[in-house]
Image: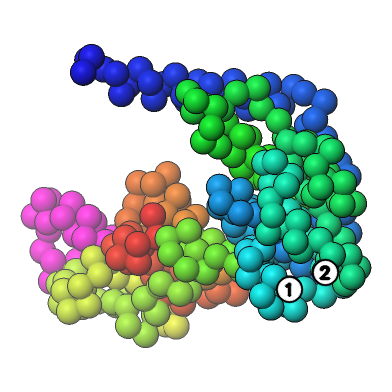
């Protein structure tokens, strides 16, 4: 076997698909205005169907639409023929993806789709195909060559159709005014969901469990409190109001000066200008602030009142970053 044959052939296939994407983007066939308008105007849900490789693309397209504000489901045409068509109502629409436009399972569905008066849209490579002719809206996706050297396995054609589906989903997202907050509502799980939904108040140590010391007390008193709470920082109070903080970094600096820790009062050494963040801010913003200001703890406020502290340790433990 020749050296680097895998690398050579893989790159060749990759570049073929890349060129087909470029060619389609420049062609007159890249026209999704009518299809996007019909999907946007649909009062119900979009059901996307396909067989084989087209079915995989249809499944991905449906998932992308659903996560970007357009309710959509994948439905296998064979299952639709055996009862699943009953879940589709007149207000819904069906988008069929078929390379040839002659997929038998989809063609067998056409009489039932017409009888139920459901709008049918399609993406095929043949504008004169049975599925294309039966559609209210049709988008032609035809590539010059597949990446498969025998021009048999759907490769370039599925890549272009996949990219087209993403492009349509993004166009609909933009027109709908779909925001990152909307995205978070449908992605509550995993690291992505946490980045979009977790607030500082969800992770903070509430003031009732934080190290809190009066400004009239000494550094020695603070050491006992901080050691017990194991937070590396203490909130310094005067009366009922937090007037500053004192961190383990502050402690190290004063110890290096050989100060008498049982005599030095916190009122004379506390940090008055500490970094704050509101309780409803996203945790990722808190992490960005910590990085920018080179600190590992933020004081959390709600209605201009200190309600807790948030540490980088808490953020990392929550697996947000």
Answer yes or no: do the residues labelled 2 and 1 have beta carbons within 8 Å?
yes
**Residue 42 visible in the shown view:** no
Residue 222 in picture, x, y percent from top left = 21, 73
Q: Is residue 206 within the magenta segment?
A: no
Q: Residue at x 89, y 70 (%)?
A: 115
The residue mark sitting in front, 2 or 1, is 2
Give the percent coordinates (x, y) of residue 160: 63, 35
Viewer-closest of 173 and 270: 173
Q: Which residues are magenta?
A: 242-269
Q: Which residue is mark 1?
A: 85
Residue 190 quadrant: bottom left
Mark 2 neighbour density, 10 Å: few (under 14) some (14–19) many (20 or more)? some
Which of the 4 image quarters holds residue 78?
bottom right
Say if residue 3 shows up in the picture: yes
- The label shown at residue 112 is 2
Q: Residue furthest left?
A: 258
Pinpoint residue 62: horizontal percent, then vertical percent: 65, 58
Who's the residue at 67% across and 63% down the image? 77
Q: Residues within 10 Å of mark 1 (few under 14, many from 20)?
A: some
Using the image as rendered, state which of residue 169 and residue 305 is in the foreground. Answer: 169
Callout 2: SS = helix
Tell whether 270 sits left or right of 185. Answer: left
Q: Is residue 252 left or right of residue 201?
A: left
Nearest to N terminus: mark 2 or mark 1: 1
Along the line of sight, the residue nearer the viewer: 318 or 277: 318
In this rendered view, identify the residue nearer to me: 170 or 150: 150
- Residue 56 sits above or below residue 111 on the image: above
| Residue lying farthest to the top in this orientation | 2
Where is residue 141? Give x, y as percent. Answer: 72, 35
């Amino acid at each position: 076997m020749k050296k680097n044959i895998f690398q050579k052939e893989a790159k060749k296939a990759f570049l073929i698909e890349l060129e087909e994407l470029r060619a389609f983007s420049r062609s007159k066939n890249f026209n999704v205005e009518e299809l996007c308008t019909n999907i946007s105007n649909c009062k119900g849900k979009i059901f996307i169907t396909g067989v084989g490789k087209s079915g995989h693309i249809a499944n991905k397209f449906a998932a992308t639409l659903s996560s970007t504000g357009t309710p959509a489901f994948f439905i296998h045409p064979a299952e639709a023929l055996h009862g699943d068509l009953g879940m589709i109502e007149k207000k819904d629409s069906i988008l069929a993806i078929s390379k040839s436009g002659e997929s038998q399972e989809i063609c067998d569905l056409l009489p039932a789709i017409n009888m139920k008066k459901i709008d049918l849209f399609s993406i095929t490579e043949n504008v004169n195909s049975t599925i294309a002719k039966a559609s209210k809206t049709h988008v032609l996706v035809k590539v010059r060559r597949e990446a498969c050297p025998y021009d048999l396995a759907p490769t370039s054609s599925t890549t272009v159709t996949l990219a087209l589906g993403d492009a349509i989903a993004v166009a609909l997202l933009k027109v709908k005014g779909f925001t990152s907050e909307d995205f978070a509502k449908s992605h509550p799980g995993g690291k992505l969901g946490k980045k979009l939904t977790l607030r500082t108040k969800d992770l903070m140590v509430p003031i009732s469990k934080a190290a809190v010391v009066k400004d009239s007390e000494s550094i020695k008193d603070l050491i006992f409190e901080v050691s017990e709470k194991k937070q590396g920082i203490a909130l310094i109070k005067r009366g009922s109001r937090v007037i500053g903080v004192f961190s383990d970094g502050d402690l190290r600096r004063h110890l290096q000066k050989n100060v008498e820790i049982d005599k030095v009062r916190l009122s004379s050494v506390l940090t008055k200008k500490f970094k704050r963040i509101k309780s409803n801010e996203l945790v990722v913003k808190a992490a960005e602030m910590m990085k920018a200001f080179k600190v590992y703890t933020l004081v959390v406020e709600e209605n201009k009142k200190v309600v807790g502290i948030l540490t980088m340790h808490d953020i990392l433990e929550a697996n947000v970053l």
